[in-house]
Image (cartoon, rainbow, N blue to C red):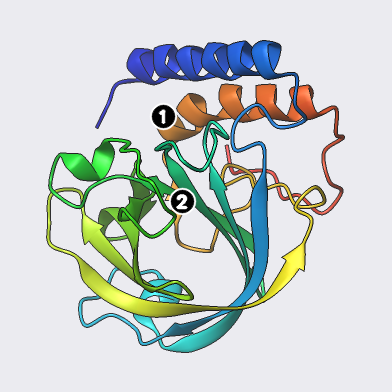
């Protein structure tokens, strides 16, 4: 894993980049300024290999709010890094997952890659989650414009499908939805302390740029 100083340095870089984009653009959201919000349903088939995370290991069905967006908000004729944000509505509260366009290889799963359309590239969580069985990375691959297959993998391992996400009704404006994987976590998928340090400065800056107060229902990430 990456050391604490590296995480802190990376977090400072992300915060500075977010601040710079906010200063240039002047939009409510410095990154992923506009998006399409869609209601969806996640059909989990479970995993043949146990991760210790019931959400990955066990079959079930979840209602999900999805946001598809472009990281820089460039015109649609230009390539951009596409994002897929999922808010999974669980019995324990909302759990947010953020995925961005990458590859699926051992190295490329950690490298942001632009594409021309929201289904043109695989998407991963980029940074690993801590589970009882070790680090895992999540991915989504478009099967059709309305369907994605979700998989998990060890940091350098093969991908294991565990669910299919089916998009349904567009919700309209995305201005009332803010995703934050640091503060909203699915039970068993824990942010590493270093990952929280890496992400939090950028998300804090994004919240400050939007001028929005923290939602009352937000659960603080464990220390």
Residue 218 horizontal/vertical position (percent): 76, 49
Q: Residue at x 53, y 15 (%)?
A: 17
Asked if the residue at tag 2 contacts the one at tag 1, i.e. Cβ–Cβ closer than 8 Å, the answer is: no
Q: Real-space Cα distance between discs 1 and 2?
A: 11 Å
Residue 187 horizontal/vertical position (percent): 53, 64
Left or right: 156, with 125 as reference point: left
Q: Residue at x 46, y 13 (%)?
A: 13
Residue 50 horizontal/vertical position (percent): 26, 75
Quarter of the picture holding the N terminus: top left
Q: Residue at x 68, y 19 (%)?
A: 25
Left or right: 64, with 5 as reference point: right
Q: Is residue 145 above or below residue 107?
A: below
Depth check, front residue: 190 or 89: 89
Q: Is residue 191 above or below residue 27?
A: below
**How many numbered circles are shown?**
2
Depth check, front residue: 183 or 178: 178
Depth check, front residue: 47 or 69: 69
User: Residue at the front extreme?
Assistant: 77
- Numbered label attached to residue 109: none
Residue placed under numbered mark 1 in the picture = 194
Label 1 Cα neighbours within 10 Å, binned few <14 / some 14-19 / many ≥20: some
Residue 109 horizontal/vertical position (percent): 23, 45
Mark 2, secondary structure of its residue: strand
Residue placed under numbered mark 2 in the picture = 190
Mark 1, secondary structure of its residue: helix
Please tell me in which quadrant of the rendered image residue 163 appears. bottom left
Label 2 Cα neighbours within 10 Å, binned few <14 / some 14-19 / many ≥20: many
Q: Is residue 129 above or below residue 20?
A: below
Q: Residue at x 57, y 37 (%)?
A: 223
Depth check, front residue: 120 or 209: 120
Q: Is residue 97 above or below residue 164?
A: above
Please tell me in which quadrant of the rendered image residue 95 appears. bottom right
């Amino acid at each position: 894993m990456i050391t604490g100083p590296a995480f802190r340095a990376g977090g400072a870089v992300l915060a500075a980049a977010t601040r710079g984009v906010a200063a240039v653009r002047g939009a409510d959201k410095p990154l992923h300024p506009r998006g399409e919000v869609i209601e969806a349903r996640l059909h989990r088939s479970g995993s043949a290999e146990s991760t210790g995370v019931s959400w990955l290991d066990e079959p079930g069905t979840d209602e999900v709010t999805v946001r598809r967006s472009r990281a820089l908000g460039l015109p649609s004729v230009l390539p951009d890094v596409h994002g897929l944000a999922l808010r999974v509505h669980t019995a324990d509260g909302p759990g947010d997952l953020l995925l961005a366009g990458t590859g699926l290889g051992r190295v490329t799963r950690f490298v942001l890659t632009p594409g021309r359309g929201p289904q043109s590239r695989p998407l991963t969580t980029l940074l690993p989650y801590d589970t009882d069985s070790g680090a895992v990375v999540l991915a989504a691959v478009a099967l059709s414009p309305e369907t994605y297959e979700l998989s998990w993998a060890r940091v350098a391992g093969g991908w294991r499908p565990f669910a299919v996400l089916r998009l349904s009704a567009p919700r309209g404006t995305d201005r009332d939805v803010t995703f934050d994987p640091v503060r909203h976590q699915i039970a068993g998928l824990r942010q590493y302390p270093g990952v929280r340090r890496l992400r939090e400065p950028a998300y804090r800056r994004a919240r400050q740029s939007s001028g929005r107060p923290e939602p009352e229902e937000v659960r603080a990430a464990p220390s």
